[in-house]
């Protein structure tokens, strides 16, 4: 007996599978959904996760040669399908000099009903700071933010080695990459189990308590010799610490965009650990800044809300994924509900990953 649950149309191919719970649980026979690659990009349903009913018609008929991902966007009543573009989806073929980056890249198709799909449009591709191929991309959504963990392939410099980088988006269409382009999950040392390739699995990170587990495909060799040995690796990180802003010995300041207060406390995911040599100036402090009145003729200087200044802020010295900020011992922001404000962060020997105005 084997663990094969789907062989694809005609028993030919079913790989790069993404299995997930159907957001619409009204039909017990469609409790589970699976995206896979097999004579096109296909969708299947299952009641138990073992026996699958594959739709007769593919979502897309061309060979989108990497794991393809469905993401539900409920506020738009749309499905986002992340695939490769229909033109040169596998990156193969002669191209003019300087156009190598037009090969393997990420495109988006949308649908309201999983049947009618828009034309896939390229949304993320290698620029002059990247290697010329995005070999595979895992796209998922968390706290309203879209994350893309893309495996960048050094095809022109070696044996097609991969390692994982990070991009983020608010709408799933316009993406931002980290300014330093450092790998999010780098390859291991030469000769190690993941010294040649690191590429994400088809599942989002698994949250367990304060940790997140990120499973990835690994090989000691590049893709030109991928068949020699493959394995599964796991990377660990504290919850939601994908990207952070850090300050060292020199004081750093960060000013947020303007937003409306819709809650009564400020919660930070942050790091500011005390040490035997820490000073009173180390750590994190937060001020709440009034939104300026642009109806006045003069530009007003930055003005903190009384009671919520940097001087009022209690110094934060902790490593915590959900630290509640206080001003002179008080966390309550109820008086600011509905008002437009900014946040001014003071950091020294500290890091800030995220903030949230929570109920």
Image: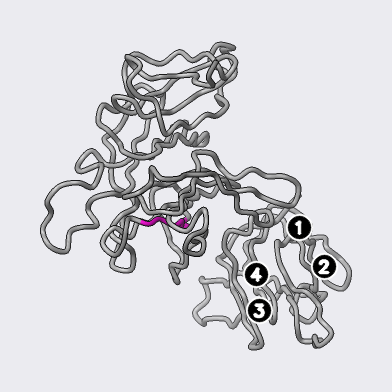
Helix, strand or loop status at disc 1: strand
- Classify mark 3: helix, strand or loop: loop
The answer to whether 129 appears left or right of 286 in the picture is left
Choose between 161 and 89: the one closer to the eye.
161
Depicted 65 relative to depicted 253: above or below: above
Figure check: 8 above or below 320: above
**Left or right position of 185 against 99:** right
Circle number at residue 326: 2
Question: Disc 1 marks which residue?
Answer: 322
Q: Earlier in the sequence, mark 2 or mark 4?
A: 2
Task: Residue 87: give x, y in percent of width and height.
Answer: 19, 41
Name the quarter where the N terminus is drawn. Answer: top right
Q: Which residue is mark 4?
A: 343
Q: Looking at the image, which is closer to me, 36 or 155?
A: 155
> CA gap, disc 3 to disc 4?
11 Å
Q: In the shown orientation, is residue 255 left or right of residue 161? A: right
**Which quarter of the picture shows residue 242?**
bottom right
105 horizontally vs 261: left or right: left
Quote the CA–CA distance across marks 1 and 2. 13 Å
Asked whether the residues under the numbered discs 1 and 3 touch, taking CB atoms below 8 Å apart as contact, a structural biologist would say no
x 56%, y 42%: residue: 204
For label 1, count other residues whose C-alpha is less than 10 Å away and answer few (under 14), some (14-19) or many (20+).
some
Q: Residue at x 77, y 75 (%)?
A: 306
Specify few, some or many for label 2: CA neighbours under 10 Å numbering under 14, 14-19, or 20 or more. Answer: many
What residue is pinned by disc 3? 303
Check disc 2 and report its element: helix, strand or loop: loop
Q: Mark 1 or mark 3, which has the lower sequence index?
A: 3
């Amino acid at each position: 007996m084997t663990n094969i649950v789907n062989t694809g149309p005609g028993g030919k191919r079913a790989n790069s599978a993404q299995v997930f719970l159907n957001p619409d649980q009204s039909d017990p026979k469609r409790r589970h959904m699976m995206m896979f690659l097999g004579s096109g990009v296909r969708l299947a349903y299952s009641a138990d996760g073992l026996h699958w009913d594959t739709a007769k018609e593919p979502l897309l008929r061309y060979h989108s040669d990497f794991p393809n991902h469905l993401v539900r966007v409920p506020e738009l009543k749309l499905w986002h399908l992340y695939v490769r573009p229909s033109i040169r989806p596998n990156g193969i073929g002669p191209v003019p000099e300087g156009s190598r980056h037009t090969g393997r890249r990420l495109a988006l198709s949308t649908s309201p009903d999983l049947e009618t799909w828009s034309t896939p449009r390229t949304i993320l591709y290698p620029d002059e700071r990247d290697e010329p191929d995005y070999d595979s991309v895992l796209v998922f959504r968390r706290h309203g933010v879209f994350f893309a963990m893309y495996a960048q392939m050094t095809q022109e410099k070696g044996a097609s080695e991969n390692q994982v980088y990070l991009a983020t988006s608010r709408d799933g269409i316009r993406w931002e990459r980290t300014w330093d382009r450092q790998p999010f999950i780098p390859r291991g040392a030469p000769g190690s189990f993941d010294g040649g390739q690191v590429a994400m699995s088809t599942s989002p990170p698994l949250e367990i308590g304060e940790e997140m587990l990120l499973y990835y495909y690994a090989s000691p060799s590049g893709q030109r010799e991928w068949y020699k040995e493959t394995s599964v690796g796991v990377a660990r990180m504290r919850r939601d610490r994908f990207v952070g802003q850090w300050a060292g010995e020199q004081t750093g300041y960060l000013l947020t965009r303007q937003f409306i207060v819709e809650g009564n406390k400020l919660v930070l995911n942050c790091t500011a650990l005390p040490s035997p040599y820490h000073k009173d100036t180390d750590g994190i402090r937060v001020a709440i800044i009034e939104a300026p009145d642009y109806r006045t003729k003069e530009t007003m200087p930055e003005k903190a809300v009384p009671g919520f200044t940097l001087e009022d802020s209690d110094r934060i010295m902790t490593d915590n994924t959900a630290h509640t900020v206080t001003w002179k011992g008080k966390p309550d922001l109820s008086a600011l509900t509905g008002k437009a404000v900014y946040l001014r962060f003071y950091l020294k020997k500290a890091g800030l990953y995220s903030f949230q105005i929570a109920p």
